Image (cartoon, grey):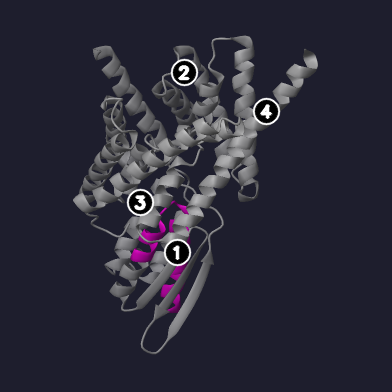
Amino acid sequence: MTQDVSLLIAAALLGAAAFAIVFRTPRRYFWLTVLIGACPFILIKLIPTDWNIGFGSFLAALLAGCLSHIAARVTRAPAQCFLIPGVILLVPGTYIYRAFNAALSRRFEDAFSLSLSAVAITLGVSFGVLLANWVVPSRKAL
Amino acid sequence: MREFLAFLRRICNLLIQSGCSSNRVELLTQILGDSWGYEVETVAIPTAVWINVRTKQETLHELTRVRRWSIDLDRLARLNELVESVRQHQLSIGEANARLTADEAMPPPYGKMLTLLAGALTSPILIFSYGGTPLTVALGVPAGILVQYLNKYLFSSEQRRYLGDFLIAASMAAYAYACRAFISAVDAPLLIIGGIVVIVPGLTLVNAVHEVAQKNLVSGAAKLLEALMITASLGFGVAFVLAIMQIFISARF
């Protein structure tokens, strides 16, 4: 279990670091972005699998949003710098692809079910980020 | 006033190009207008920005067309600092325009090799998070490098955008099924998903819903359509390789 958690934390940190580089996070905020980006990924992996998938994504996005806005207030940088590398690990890319692939293979029932999961995650992440704007309001326009 | 409008046009274009949301761009122009004594109204969508600057005597309009966009957080942070300086009148509009010109020539914060290495890490980590075996995770490293190279350097031109997505997905599918032909334990669909998920428009979809939720209906709808187009290009790319494989297998047996 301890090994699983350490592996999960390592994967989360590496994933956030990789996306921070891919999205060209400013060098001076790199480590802070990595720390903030890893938290929602760890949270969503620790949420029990029998919970609603959209609700889990909502909680993780809310955490990412709140941490990003706090970091933006402290550093005076745009919240997006901290938010995007964290949220990218939550977005339903795999569900979108699997749904499209199922539709192409004429497995319409699977395609419908996967699309609904993608919609649930998308709505969960979007409303998590929106609610974070209310919980920790932006200090600046960007 | 004309200089101020020209500055707004440039900064709006750069902000949308760097991945800033439409509602933030609209809010920012309004704040800048208030601080310089102009009434500013802006409509921003992912492909264009209309700006209207008004005083009691004069009204000026400007349109800027945005032809390409991606996420560049480093530039976004620099633009944020510039806007703050202009808002607080620490910089004149002329100085701000000169800073924008210098900013456009600045190199990216991370080199090509580091970006490719980061791309190489994203795919195996995503495959690991989907429950892939260590072998599939390991095969995700070259997949990540391939996708990152094709996406960032080979097919980065706007004219080849959807064709690029199609070709990336097709090369990923070819790579995954070639791996499976040699090692039967490889989970080819998972390898394909891990490879192309970096360009699957999940973030675009989330941004689209975010825009719609903030009543930016046109911008949200445009982003939804973009997400649909990219998904279709990727899906058809994989389906193309699968169809060729089927023809090849049925001709052989």
Callout 4: SS: helix
Query: Is A69 situated left or right of A114 in this image?
Result: left
Q: Give the farthest residue toward the right.
A: B251
Residue at x-position 25% and y-position 49%? A131
Figure check: A28 above or below B171:
below
Mark 2 sits on what residue? B137
Residue B180 image-quadrant placement = top right
Badge 3 density bin: few <14, some 14–19, many ≥20, Cα 10 Å: many
Looking at the rendered structure, the kind of residue marked 1 is: Ala
Mark 2, chain letter?
B
Disc 1 + disc 4, Cβ < 8 Å: no
In depth, the one of A98 and A12 nearer the eye is: A98
Q: Earlier in the sequence, mark 3 or mark 2?
A: 3
- Label 2 and label 1: CA atoms lie apart by 41 Å
Assess whether residue B6 is covered by the magenta stretch: yes
- The magenta span reads B1-27
Residue at x-position 46% and y-position 46%? B204
Callout 1: SS: strand
Mark 4 sits on what residue? B241
Q: Are marks 3 and 2 on the same chain?
A: yes
Q: Are marks 4 and 2 on the same chain?
A: yes
Mark 1, chain letter?
B
Looking at the rendered structure, the kind of residue marked 2 is: Val
Please identify the dominant SS of the magenta region: helix
In depth, the one of B237 and A74 nearer the eye is: B237
Mark 4, chain letter?
B
- Label 4 and label 2: CA atoms lie apart by 22 Å
Mark 3, chain letter?
B
- Label 1 and label 4: CA atoms lie apart by 39 Å
